[in-house]
Amino acid sequence: MSRNVESWQSDGSTWAARGPRSLRGAARNRRGLCAAAIAALLLPLAACGTEAGSGGGAAASSTSTPSRIIADRVLKVSDVHEETGMTLLEGPTFDGEGRLHVVDVTAPPGDGKVMRIDLDAGEVEQVYTDDTGAYTSAQWSPRDDRLYLTDYAGGRILSVTADGGDPQTVFEGKVDGRVMHPDDLTFDDAGNLFVTDSSPTTYPDAEPSGRVVRIDAETRDATVLADNQPNPNGISFNLEKDALWISQLDADRIDRLRLNEERTKVSVGHTAVHIDGGGAQTDSNAVDAEGNIYQAMHGRPEIRVHGPDGQQVATIGVPPDHDGLESATNIAIKPGTNDAYATVSGPDGGYIYHFEAIGEGIRQSNGG
């Protein structure tokens, strides 16, 4: 999740500033939730620190100019909440019936923290809410078909049924002596959970302290795969499922972490893509059936698309006259199709935008 740095006072009343047409033609401070301190715990809601709307184009190492795609607005999902002073949509993911689910990170108790959208009918319904959670991502487990949610504020992973019932805590507590701030998540085919543990880097002197954590599907034991990370946010497997793409919010880059055969350790890693974000930062990411990486941006309503080789092939944006939008936090490509939907938010509210993806949707582009 990432956003401009803000903090939510413990009474839930104030946020104080600190601190997404066709792609076939293209070769085709949320998520760090910007250090928003949540409720009484005053926890940073993910990362951030840059001004919305300032800045710079994506770095492209290819010889051709990346295509510019303008996404279409589908519907408005949420207004700014009076209690928190903002709305921040995240975690878009389709269920087995083709309905889109999203989370609203900043929704107060009683409002929809998980919402279900009928895109054909243009209808939005509340699925889940509670008194304390700040949910920054969502994805369906291949193990039990439940919806898994990262609670950044509570330092836990929660799962619910498709209708938002039977909430169960999958993991909470310390990992190697420190409570997690889980931001994004993904699964391998066995249902093991891979999570970015967000930790904003305070420049210029602080050492990066974010982590990538694996939670075993059987034992629910947590293991640190990588530490000293500059505020990791997005996380997706590559097509071969032997490496993770990690978006580093505070470094504007995407790292490639190669895993061992059991996916229990990082065997080697390197920075794979540098993002010239200017005033924007790297939020969540997703991977389609052709291996393309969709990098969502906090600080600008934009998605950068990079091929498996790291070269930028497209930029997806919103119409220039759509004011009041500051971030495109994540995307979901409807499985088996090229229909892609982005969560876009700002002072004007939270929206869903549609564009045509380069490759078809798969698990790695359906939530997280």
Image: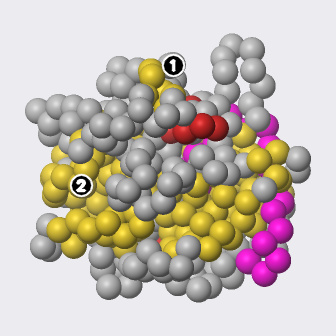
* Residue 72 seen from this side: yes
The secondary structure making up most of the magenta span is: strand
Which image quadrant for residue 207? top right
Q: Give the x, y percent position of residue 195.
A: 66, 57
Q: Which mark is residue 327?
A: none
Q: Farthest right residue? A: 177
Q: Is residue 323 magenta?
A: no
Q: Which mark is residue 19?
A: 1
Residue visible at 52% across and 75% down in the picture = 160
* Residue 103 seen from this side: no
Disc 1 from disc 2: Cα separation: 27 Å
Q: Is residue 230 magenta?
A: yes
Q: Farthest top residue? A: 204
Which image quadrant for residue 354? bottom left
As drawn, 46 above or below 351: above
Q: Tag 2: residue type?
A: Val
